[in-house]
């Protein structure tokens, strides 16, 4: 297999996936961080395209489809990595309004 950049197939330090409604984009990086693979494919070709790649760490966005894609990646021997959810700083709850006293 050759990459879209015309280089022979190789192992990747990491792979990134951009998950879309109908199309996925993948980018493979070597150990120096250089892009060595760029590919675009339809959702239905996900499993067959990822099966062609050597097992790697695969970064993907945290979205509704990420669970489905993560299960597929694990089944093929890849290691899915999604970012930890961002959390907002704790804010104190607003004070309860004062209740009027009965006369």
Image (spheres, rainbow, N blue to C red):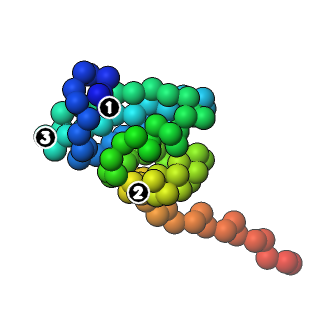
Which numbered disc, 2 or 1, marks the residue that appears first in the sequence? 1
Q: Are marks 2 and 3 in contact (CB under 8 Å)?
A: no
Which label belongs to residue 56? none
Measured from the top left, where is residue 88 in percent x and y?
46, 56
Q: Nearer the viewer, mark 2 or mark 3?
A: 2
| Relative to 74, residue 66 above or below | above
Q: Give the alpha-carbon distance from disc 3 to disc 1, as whole Å.
A: 21 Å
Please tell me whether mark 1 sits on a helix, a strand or a loop.
loop
Tell me the quarter of the image containing the C terminus.
bottom right
Residue drawn at (44%, 44%), measured in percent from left and top? 51
Residue drawn at (13%, 40%), measured in percent from left and top? 32
* Mark 2 residue crowding within 10 angstroms, few (<14) / some (14–19) / many (20+): some
**Mark 3 sits on what residue?**
32
- Indicate the quadrant where residue 9 lies: top left
Q: Which of 93 and 97 is in front in this view?
A: 93
* Mark 1 residue crowding within 10 angstroms, few (<14) / some (14–19) / many (20+): few
Which label belongs to residue 77? 2
Please tell me whether mark 2 sits on a helix, a strand or a loop.
loop
**Mark 1 sits on what residue?**
1
């Amino acid at each position: 297999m050759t990459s879209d950049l015309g280089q022979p197939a190789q192992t990747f330090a990491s792979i990134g996936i951009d998950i879309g409604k109908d199309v996925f984009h993948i980018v493979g990086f070597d150990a120096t961080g250089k892009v060595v693979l760029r590919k675009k494919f339809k959702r239905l070709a996900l499993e067959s395209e990822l099966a062609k790649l050597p097992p790697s760490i695969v970064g993907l966005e945290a979205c509704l489809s990420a669970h489905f894609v993560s299960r597929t990646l694990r089944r093929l021997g890849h290691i899915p990595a999604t970012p930890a959810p961002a959390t907002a700083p704790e804010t104190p709850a607003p004070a309860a309004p004062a209740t009027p006293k009965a006369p």
